[in-house]
Image: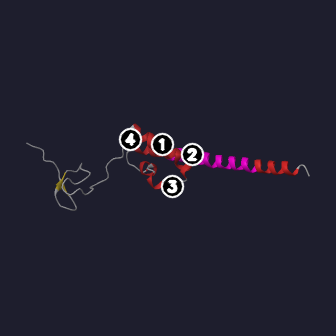
Amino acid sequence: MELQETLTLCPVCHQPVKPEYYFCPNCGTKLHQPPLSTSVWNQIGIYAFSIILPSIFFIFVTKWPGIKYAKSEDKKARIIGVIAISLLVISTIVTIWLAYYFTQQAVQSSIDSINTDFSGF
């Protein structure tokens, strides 16, 4: 006896598709979300993007995949998302602190320069 595969129908073209398909082979309609990549290079890219994101003032925040990974059902992808969010928070705090520190240094340098200029009077 042969086991029959359970097939579903594509909601657009109504052709039979296997349940493990992410896209309809006939019309290309997305049937369900493919799993997120958890490769080492993808992780490195996400983590690096999380670290530099505050430095570029969140211009590319819509392209940052950290939230998508954190909300994933896959446990490994969720861990990647949590690490990426943590790196983003830490990087943001460091960026704000560095901006504050260097601004204070510039202001103090200006004040010292003004005081030196007027010390001769």
Residue range of the region highlighted in magenta in the rendering: 85-107
- Residue 58 % position (x, y): 52, 54
- Residue drawn at 76 percent across, 47 percent down: 109
Residue corresponding to mark 2: 91
The earlier-in-sequence mark between 3 and 4 is 4
Q: Is-magenta flag for residue 51?
A: no
Query: Few, some or many C-alpha atoms within 10 Å of disc 2 (few <14, some 14-19, many ≥20)?
Result: some
Q: CA distance from mark 1 to mark 2?
A: 11 Å
The reply to whether dot 2 and dot 4 touch (C-beta < 8 Å) is no
Which sits in the foreground, 5 or 67?
A: 67
Q: Which mark is residue 59?
A: 3
The earlier-in-sequence mark between 3 and 2 is 3
Residue corresponding to mark 1: 47
Q: Is-magenta flag for residue 106?
A: yes
- Residue 43 % position (x, y): 43, 41
Residue corresponding to mark 4: 38
- Residue drawn at 44 percent across, 53 percent down: 63
The reply to whether dot 1 and dot 3 touch (C-beta < 8 Å) is no
Identity of the amino acid at label 3?
Ile
Instruction: Describe residue 12's horizontal placement relative to residue 44 as left or right.
Output: left
Q: Nearer the viewer, mark 3 or mark 2?
A: 3
